[in-house]
Image (cartoon, rainbow, N blue to C red):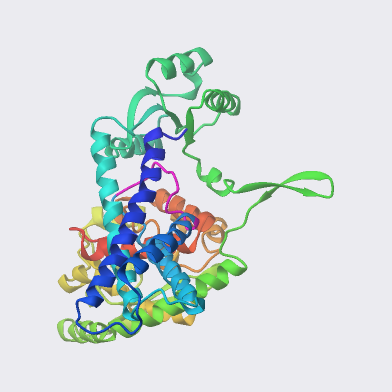
Amino acid sequence: MRKRSELLISVLQIPVDYLMLVVSFILAYFLRQGSGKPFSVEVGGYTYLNLMLLFLPIWLLIFASVGLYRIRSDRTKWLDLGKILAACSAGMMVLIVIDFFSSKPIFPAKIIPIYGFLFALLFVSIGRIIMSVVQRLLARYGVGVYRVLFIGSGPAALKLKSTLKKLKRRYKIVSSIGSLDSVSSARLEGLIRRDHIDTVIVAESSIDDEKLTEIISYCQSNHVGYQYLPTMSGMYTSKILSTQIGDMPVLELKPTPIEGWGRVIKRLFDVFFTLIIALVTIPLQLVIYLIIKIKDPGPAFYLHECYGRRGKKINVYKFRTMKSEYSIGPKFGGRTIDEVLDKLPKPKAEEFRKTAKIKDDPRVGKLGRILRKTSLDELPQLYNVLKGDLSLVGPRPLPESELKLLGGKENLARIVTIRPGITGLWQVSGRNDLEYSDRVRLNIYYIENWSIWLDVKILFKTIWQAFFERNGI
């Protein structure tokens, strides 16, 4: 069930976007007019304004087509910057095409659509920030907040419950039941009616199909939302489609969208943006290389052997962030990870063996901490992307040492169905604070729900967290 306030926010967003677009192109007109140069084409101010009022609704249709008006309860501080950029670009192209084929010009000067495009990016984003603030203020008074009946126990349920409590402007747990076994139809109905429940969330590791069916049926019949935290096996079966072979109904497991044309589009996206990023960052990469060579003699690059797509072994390039004495591989005397861990305090070694990460890692130098905090150590991986070993966004490259955390090679095939990525969904969703099973869960979610817009959002969020959030990513 969607909250009415969500629908209201989405509906109000349309006139706000339209107003921001009109303001953008009016400012573009006056900015060009204020330059003192004569217009190249005589288009009066009122004529120009009327044309903008007529054609800018096309932009709203494009906004809708990319999902900028999708009703959702997961609005956060992170804006749909990738979608706004793509939609404004498409809208601008439409206006330019109309201007080209029109018998009468729309723009009195060629620079005006450029100004309009830049102002549109700025003001549409500002408009959405304003709407987000309004929604946040309403949430303080309980408007738009989901009243939750939470069912479940165990580590995953406790973690989800803790997350819901942090998202207090969207969710409020008003009732809680420890186990599905204690849920009866009468109790469920009583709690939903008494506490005005908007949605039921089930986070139960042992699933009772009969109980679940009963809960789902009641929720659907009474317009109450239903969500559940799937088990690890459930993550792999969440994309089941109903189809037919001849006249026989069958269930088909939907493959990742990163197949066929999706794979082609993702590869073109990777190459285009990687070339731009690589060219822009070459001076920075040279500076980092020289500093590493001066501060800690030894190879400036570290080649990390990992599993790539379809389990192929690849060497992932990174700037070396660890002290030479703790680095492993042929270039560092052939030391193994176990030999390095033996040099560490026992709690640190055990932490690595459990999570493949160490907080306040003593192996990392001062420069290495800065590089890791800002993710600049991963700049050389751009060349892995151009080689075709990596993608800009995807599951994290998987080293041999983490196989046991996956449960063995039988689970490896599930993670390496696509190219690994420089950044990914779990890196922007908690990074070192996540349990390894949660990282696997997020990787699977990404594989099954990939879209080019998801890649853009993850890239923007990676940059934001690396340079604008206090603790980096």
Q: Is residue 146 left or right of residue 183?
A: left
Q: Quadrant of residue 171?
A: top left
Q: What residue sits 49% from the left and 32% below the top?
A: 226
Q: What residue sits 42% from the left and 54% below the top?
A: 68
Q: What residue sits 41% from the left and 53% below the top?
A: 439
Query: How many callouts does the rendering have?
Result: 0
Q: Position of residue 98 (x, y in %)?
A: 49, 73
Q: Is residue 231 visible?
A: yes
Report the front residue among 65 and 36. Answer: 36
Q: Is residue 403 left or right of residue 368?
A: right
Q: What residue sits 52% from the left and 26% below the top?
A: 219
Magenta residue span: 65-76
Q: Position of residue 460 (x, y in %)?
A: 33, 64
Q: Quadrant of the C terminus?
A: bottom left
In reply to whether residue 10 is colored magenta, the answer given is no
Report the front residue among 234 and 261. Answer: 261
In reply to whether residue 72 is colored magenta, the answer given is yes
Question: What secondary structure do most residues of the magenta stretch adopt?
Answer: loop
Q: Is residue 96 above or below residue 210?
A: below
Most extreme residue toward the right is: 246
Q: Is residue 329 above or below residue 350?
A: below
Q: Is residue 350 above or below residue 166?
A: below
Q: Is residue 250 left or right of residue 123?
A: right
Q: Position of residue 255 (x, y in %)?
A: 62, 57
Q: Is residue 79 visible?
A: no
